[in-house]
Structures are given as structure tokens and as C-alpha cells.
């Protein structure tokens, strides 16, 4: 019988780092009128919290890094300060 | 040995508050250490920092598990953190709030509206009211260190006189 | 006494470096050491330290730049931690072999994997045989004082070997304690490196050294390591005379009448004093020996007839605790209970240490936190 050595192996799963949305200082707010659904925001999101089809942002896990806002070619994602 | 745990959020200056507290105690002729709890550092996340004050050099490096006092710089951390964890029976709680807060019986509770004081004294940096210098005034009132040493600890850290003004306001506001 | 300043261990080391006035600092940032070299970079930028600060692309290059600078006869400093130290490994041997008095701040941190930035001594102990002197400190004041003394010891012509000042990651690198920023005055004499480069008298360095002579160079290193015991004693005595703070290669706490002695390095060795106080209240005659200088290894520990509880914040796999093993090797009659504790920043309190003493089983190795049946 093989014995699995004790070591650190992480398994990717939803929310593996906890409720990272609580880290947020700025919240992304999308102007849906201007958005042309190019999907670049979802492609760049480092935490994959933007649904590639609906482009809805999952605020439970969004850390508020602002990369989507920076990359948006239509400049329609504003970063708004969270009230703590 | 008197052990204090400070609850704040990253960027609020909880670690600097710990350092000023320890520094004020040292100016009183005591011995003190201050340390952050080492974890992921990011703005807005709940963090804790620790202060130990004693009449002899502090030789303990392990974490504080049974503090005599809890200082809550940001009451919203109580939503996710059990701030009373390990607080000794009869221990003290200082909280920055303008509301009434219910704590279980058996603790001494003190409060001051440090955020309100910071706003009144126009002690606001990058949109955030500064609470880590007024708290020094409040804790001087509670007798953790003398008022004079508290002022010195603040002025050696921050030159802006609004800091000491806010600390004085907090000193007046705390009811002992 | 001058005013006490609240400072982290990192900033105290940087402040001592400013006082020692090295002409060259070459370093690469790594947690939890970064604050040392950031502070030094600030001093250089502000003109408070007239040094050439060389930012490099790796720790291997940092040590290489230090070696190049040092051979010109100037005072040199660098700092690193854990993986950075290991990345320097080849050049650590080179620096010592080239007999260069480089001083390095080393913040002890765990080695991956799993990724862990907390305190552990395995990083520095794995560099035990490089020919560097190693001192382990336990307070912010001691970090400052040891750094000042390191330059004087390394540069003494009886030594001419590099010195590594070890400080526990976060536990000491980031804690804030009051310390006195003593002005060293002429405590550190000007460096006079006998083999420095002289452009008017060109020579080659690191030339071929065949088998019939190489061992002589190595024996000379060993001789200097042995002589460094005297230099350390002299330097610490002179420091105490001038500045009133005394240190010894092994710091003793209530050892004279002790039946059992806790032996540890760094912050564990300091907190162990509180454990000894606790045990004495219970009627157990306990003491503490905090080993400060691991290289050169102390040969005059007064441990005859006493039980030793040696706490190793390290492990040499397939052997055991490094410090316990070294004591046993040099003191064959020593009665040792070995404890492996604090790996990866595992919390070890003075109460835990007192329990190591109460439940000690002489001649065994105990891993703190591992169930008895797995030991």
C-alpha cells in the first residue's frame, strides 16, 4: 500500500482563500449602459469573479483590485470606496 | 505584567498606536514591547497588535492569549472577530464608538468617539479619520501611562499638532 | 544614559550599520529582513550614511558584490533571510575562504515548502560549515550591540572571517522594544585589510591552490576561528567597559545551583528565563543557557552533572536537533533531553518550555506537538 507523504498541496475550489470580498477597499461599479460586453474585464480578472457570459461581478470574492476598471476599453467600471 | 490587545483594520494605524503606547510607558520608566500579529498585510482587513508593559524588561515573545485589556479602534471588526477572546475576568475594554455597546458583565467598559473627535479636529488623511493618536489620550486617562508621556510619544511620531489636540479631546471625553 | 528609542530589531540593525559606516552595502530584499536594507537605503539616500548602495538582482549577486567590494579593503554589509541565504550559499564559502570580514544581518526564517515566513533556525544552521562566525541575538538592544561588535570582531586581523548576526524572523525582526542607540566612537577601529587590492602592486586572487597547499589555507581558517574566541571575549569585555552592557558567548541565567538547564538560541533562549522563574517557584532548580555564538562553538559550557533540555528550532533530518547534537559531540558526558520545537513559527511559550523540563526524558528526542505514539 502506498503512503501519501504529509505535505502542502492546495486544491483549487471556489473561495479557497475565504471570503476575499471582505478585503475590498474599493468596489467595482459597472455602467451597464456604456458596457459593450467585450468581456475583457472577465479575461483579466485575476480571481475569475466576473462571469464570462453575464459579466456579473461576484462581490463575495472580488478583492477590489481594480484591474477590470483599468483594462476596460470603454472606461465603464468605476472603483467606488467601500464604507467600512 | 500588563497585556493589551488592539483590534483595528489594516491601514488604521493599530501597530503605530501599539508603538506609541509602549513608548509612552517606557517614558514613564516602565519596560514595554509592542508587536503586530504577523499575517497577511492588506488595507481594510481586521488585524490585531499587542503591547506588554511591565516593571522589569519584557522577556516574553509568544503571543498574548489572556490580555488584561482590549482596545477596539474599529468597532466593525466585531462583526467577524471575537474581540473578547481570552480577556481576563474583570479586564478592561476600551472602544471607539459614539453608540452604546453591550458587552457581557464582568468587564470594565470605557468608550470615546475617537472617529468623531478626529473629524472635529480635522485629523483626516486620505479621506480616513485618524484614530490612533486620539486613542493615546483616552488610554492616558485610563492610567496606562501619564498624560505627559502620551503627548511625548505622539509628538515624536507625528509633528502635526492636530494629533495632540485630538488626544487631549479624547482624554477629556473618556469617563473613568 | 541616552534616551531610549522604540525600534524593531530590523531598524536597530540598520542603525548599528549606520554607526559602523560601511562604504558598500549590496543587498536584495526578502521578508522579514527587507526593513533592514530599506532603512539603510533611506540613510544613503538622505546622506546620513556615505555608502555606495548596490541593488542587485539576487542574493548570489549581493554576496558576490560584497566580496568584490570587500577585497578592496573597505567595510561591507549585507542582509538576507532564509531562501536568500541559501541562494548565497556558494558565495558564503567564497567570502570566508577569501578571508573577507563581511558583516551580514540574517533574519531566521523557515524554508519552503510549504511556504512559511515565520521564525526557524534551519536556514542559518544549514550554513554552519561555511566558515562564517554566527551569533544569535534575543533582544532589539542585543541586535544593535551585536552588529556593532560584529564589525570589530570580523575585521580583527586575528580573525578576518565574515560574521552573520542571526535574529528570529518577526519575533525579533518586527517587535518593537526600547533600546539605546549608543555612539560607538572609536570602538570599531579603521579597517586595515592586509590582503587588499593595491593597483600599484597587481596580484591575482583565488588562484589555483594545489593539493599540497590547500589544506594549509583551510587550517589557517580553523586557526582564526579558534582565535576568534579570544577576540569575541576581548570585544565583549571592551564593549561592557565602554557602554555598560555585557554579553558572553553563552548567556547564563541561574545556572550555578541548577539541576536542570534549558539550552536554546534566540528569543526562545530569552523567554526560557521566564520558564526557569516559574520552575523555581515550583521547587525545580532550573537555569537557562542561551547560546549566542554557535560558531565558534563554545567549549567552556559549565554543564557537568546537570540535566540539559536542549530546544532546537531546527532539525537535521536523519540526525536530530543541531544544537543538541553539537553539544553532545563536544561534551560527550552531557546528559541531554532533546526537544524539537518552534519549527515554522510554531508557538512555544514559557509554559511549554517549563513542561519540557518537567516531563523530560533524558537521552530522548521529543517533537513538540507530535502525539506520543508517533514520536
Image (cartoon, rainbow, N blue to C red):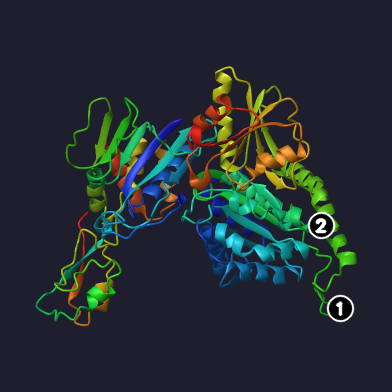
- Quarter of the image with the N terminus of chain C is top right
Q: Position of residue A73 (x, y in %)?
A: 22, 82
Q: Earlier in the sequence, mark 2 or mark 1?
A: 1
Toward the viewer: A51 or A74?
A: A51
Q: Residue furthest left?
A: A33
Q: Are marks 2 and 1 on the same chain?
A: yes
- Please indicate whether residue B167 sits to the left or right of residue C254 in the image: left
The residue where tag 1 is placed is C201
Please report, as a chain letter, where disc 2 is located: C
Do the CB atoms of the residues marked 2 and 1 lie less than 8 Å apart?
A: no
Q: Hey, which quadrant is residue C212 in on the image?
A: bottom right
Please report, as a chain letter, where disc 1 is located: C
Toward the viewer: C348 or B133?
A: C348
Tell me the CA gap for discs 2 and 1: 25 Å
Q: Report crowding for label 2: few under 14, some 14 to 19, many 20 or more residues within 10 A (C-alpha).
A: many
Q: Hey, which quadrant is residue B112 in on the image?
A: top left
Toward the viewer: B138 or B87?
A: B87
Q: Residue furthest right?
A: C212
Placement of C235 over or under C190, stated as above or below: above
Amino acid at each position: 500500500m502506498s503512503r501519501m507523504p504529509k505535505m502542502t498541496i492546495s486544491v483549487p475550489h471556489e473561495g479557497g482563500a475565504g471570503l476575499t470580498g471582505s478585503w475590498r477597499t474599493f468596489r467595482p461599479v459597472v455602467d451597464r449602459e456604456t458596457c459593450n460586453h467585450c468581456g475583457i474585464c472577465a479575461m483579466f480578472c485575476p480571481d475569475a469573479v466576473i462571469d464570462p457570459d453575464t459579466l456579473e461581478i461576484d462581490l463575495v470574492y472580488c478583492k477590489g483590485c481594480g484591474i477590470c476598471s483599468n483594462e476596460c476599453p470603454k472606461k465603464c467600471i468605476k472603483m467606488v470606496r467601500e464604507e467600512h | 505584567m500588563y497585556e493589551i490587545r488592539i483590534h483595528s483594520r489594516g491601514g488604521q494605524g493599530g501597530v503605530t498606536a501599539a508603538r506609541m503606547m509602549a513608548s509612552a510607558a517606557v517614558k514613564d520608566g516602565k519596560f514595554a514591547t509592542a508587536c503586530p500579529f504577523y499575517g497577511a498585510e492588506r488595507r481594510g482587513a481586521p488585524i490585531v497588535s499587542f503591547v506588554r508593559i511591565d516593571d522589569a524588561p519584557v522577556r516574553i515573545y509568544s503571543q498574548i492569549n489572556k490580555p488584561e485589556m482590549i482596545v477596539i479602534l474599529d468597532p466593525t471588526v466585531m462583526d467577524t472577530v471575537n474581540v473578547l477572546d481570552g480577556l481576563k475576568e474583570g479586564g478592561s475594554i476600551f472602544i471607539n464608538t459614539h453608540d452604546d455597546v453591550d458587552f457581557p458583565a464582568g468587564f470594565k467598559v470605557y468608550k470615546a468617539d475617537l472617529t468623531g473627535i478626529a473629524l472635529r479636529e480635522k485629523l483626516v488623511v486620505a479621506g480616513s479619520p485618524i484614530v490612533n493618536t486620539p486613542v493615546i489620550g483616552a488610554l492616558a486617562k485610563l492610567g496606562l501611562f501619564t498624560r505627559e508621556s502620551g503627548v511625548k510619544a505622539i509628538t515624536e511620531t507625528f509633528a502635526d499638532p492636530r494629533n495632540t489636540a485630538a488626544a487631549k479631546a479624547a482624554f477629556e471625553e473618556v469617563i473613568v | 544614559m541616552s534616551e531610549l528609542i522604540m525600534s524593531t530589531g530590523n531598524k536597530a540593525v540598520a542603525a548599528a550599520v549606520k554607526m559602523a559606516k560601511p562604504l558598500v552595502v549590496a543587498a536584495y530584499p526578502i521578508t522579514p529582513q527587507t526593513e533592514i536594507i530599506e532603512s539603510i537605503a533611506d540613510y544613503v539616500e538622505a546622506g546620513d550614511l556615505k555608502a555606495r548602495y548596490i541593488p542587485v538582482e539576487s542574493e548570489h549577486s549581493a554576496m558576490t558584490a560584497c566580496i568584490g567590494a570587500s577585497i578592496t579593503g573597505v567595510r561591507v554589509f549585507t542582509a538576507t533571510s532564509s531562501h536568500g541565504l541559501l541562494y548565497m550559499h556558494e558565495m558564503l564559502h567564497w567570502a570566508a575562504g577569501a578571508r573577507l570580514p563581511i558583516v551580514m544581518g540574517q533574519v531566521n526564517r523557515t524554508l519552503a515548502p510549504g511556504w512559511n515566513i515565520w521564525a526557524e533556525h534551519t536556514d542559518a544552521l544549514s550554513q554552519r560549515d561555511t566558515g562564517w562566525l554566527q551569533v544569535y541575538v534575543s533582544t532589539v538592544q542585543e541586535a544593535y550591540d551585536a552588529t556593532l561588535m560584529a564589525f570589530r570582531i570580523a575585521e580583527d586581523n586575528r580573525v578576518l572571517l565574515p560574521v552573520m548576526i542571526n535574529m528570529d524572523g518577526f519575533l525579533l525582526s518586527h517587535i518593537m522594544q526600547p533600546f539605546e542607540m549608543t555612539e560607538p566612537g572609536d570602538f570599531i577601529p579603521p579597517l586595515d585589510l592586509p590582503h587588499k587590492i593595491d593597483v600599484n602592486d597587481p596580484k591575482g586572487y583565488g588562484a589555483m591552490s594545489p593539493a599540497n597547499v590547500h589544506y594549509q589555507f583551510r587550517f589557517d581558517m580553523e586557526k582564526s576561528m579558534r582565535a576568534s574566541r579570544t577576540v569575541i571575549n576581548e570585544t565583549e569585555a571592551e564593549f561592557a567597559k565602554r557602554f555598560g552592557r555585557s554579553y558572553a558567548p553563552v548567556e547564563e541565567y541561574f545556572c550555578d545551583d541548577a539541576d536542570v538547564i534549558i539550552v536554546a538560541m534566540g528569543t526562545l533562549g530569552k523567554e526560557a528565563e521566564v520558564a526557569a522563574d516559574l520552575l523555581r517557584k515550583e521547587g525545580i532548580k532550573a537555569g537557562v543557557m542561551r547560546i549566542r555564538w554557535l560558531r565558534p562553538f563554545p567549549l567552556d559550557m559549565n554543564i557537568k552533572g546537570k540535566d540539559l533540555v536542549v530546544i532546537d528550532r531546527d532539525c537535521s533530518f536523519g540526525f536530530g536537533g543541531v544544537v543538541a547534537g553539537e553539544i553532545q559531540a563536544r561534551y560527550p558526558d552531557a546528559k541531554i533531553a532533546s526537544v524539537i520545537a518552534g519549527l515554522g513559527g510554531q508557538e512555544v511559550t514559557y509554559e511549554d518550555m517549563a513542561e519540557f523540563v518537567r516531563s523530560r526524558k533524558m537521552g530522548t528526542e521529543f517533537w513538540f506537538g507530535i502525539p506520543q505514539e508517533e514520536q
